[in-house]
Amino acid sequence: MNDIPKLRVARPTNNLDALIRFYRDGLGLEILFRFEDHDGFDGMMLGRPNAHYHFEFTHAHGHSAGRAPTHDHLLVFCLPDRAEWEASVQSMKSASFQPVPAFNPYWDRDGVTFEDPDGYRIVLQNSSWNR
């Protein structure tokens, strides 16, 4: 791949509205697109305009998606700027999401873990990844 691809992380859910509160109101992502009854699926994409990633959450009518299979299913956001990291953590708390202990203690050293309504976790890590 010569061009930078757009990465879409997609997964099912039973509660689109609860995920909006978590990913939009807490994490600060925007709803980029939303659809209803597309071949029996409702869904939405959240992210930031022109970013190289976004998240897609879908709900299949008549199907139960279940919860995350383990506490170690993570999305990690590396935020090297301390002020930006602190603001992101505070945004999650202000939206009524409280930190949870990480399954792997490594993530608690320089990060804060939050669990979404489906049991999947995000880590706001105060570090950079330059490899």
Image (spheres, rainbow, N blue to C red):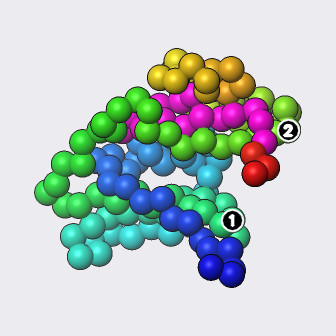
The N terminus: image quadrant: bottom right
Question: Would you call the spot at circle 1 few (<14 residues within 10 Å), some (14-19), or many (20 or more)?
Answer: few
Question: Would you call the spot at circle 2 few (<14 residues within 10 Å), some (14-19), or many (20 or more)?
Answer: few
**Which mark is first along the chain, 2 or 1?**
1
Distance between the Cα atoms at labels 1 and 2? 18 Å
Residue 19 x %, y %: 44, 45
Q: Is residue 80 left or right of residue 110?
A: right
Q: Quadrant of residue 12?
A: bottom left
Q: Which residues are magenta?
A: 112-128
Does residue 32 show up magenta in the picture?
A: no
Residue displayed at 84% across by 32% down: 82
Q: Residue 126: in sight, yes or no?
A: yes
Residue 18 x %, y %: 41, 42
Question: Looking at the picture, which amino acid does disc 2 mark?
Answer: Asp
Residue 110: which numbered mark, if any? none
Does residue 122 show up magenta in the picture?
A: yes
- In the orientation shown, which residue stands out farthest toward the bottom? 2
Toward the viewer: 88 or 2? Answer: 2
Residue 51: which numbered mark, if any? 1
Instruction: State whether residue 41 is above or below residue 71.
Output: below
Residue annotated with mark 2: 81
Residue displayed at 78% across by 42% down: 128
Q: What element does badge 1 sit on?
A: loop
Question: Looking at the picture, which amino acid does disc 1 mark?
Answer: Ala
Instruction: State whether residue 44 is above or below residue 73.
Output: below
Q: Quadrant of residue 84?
A: top right
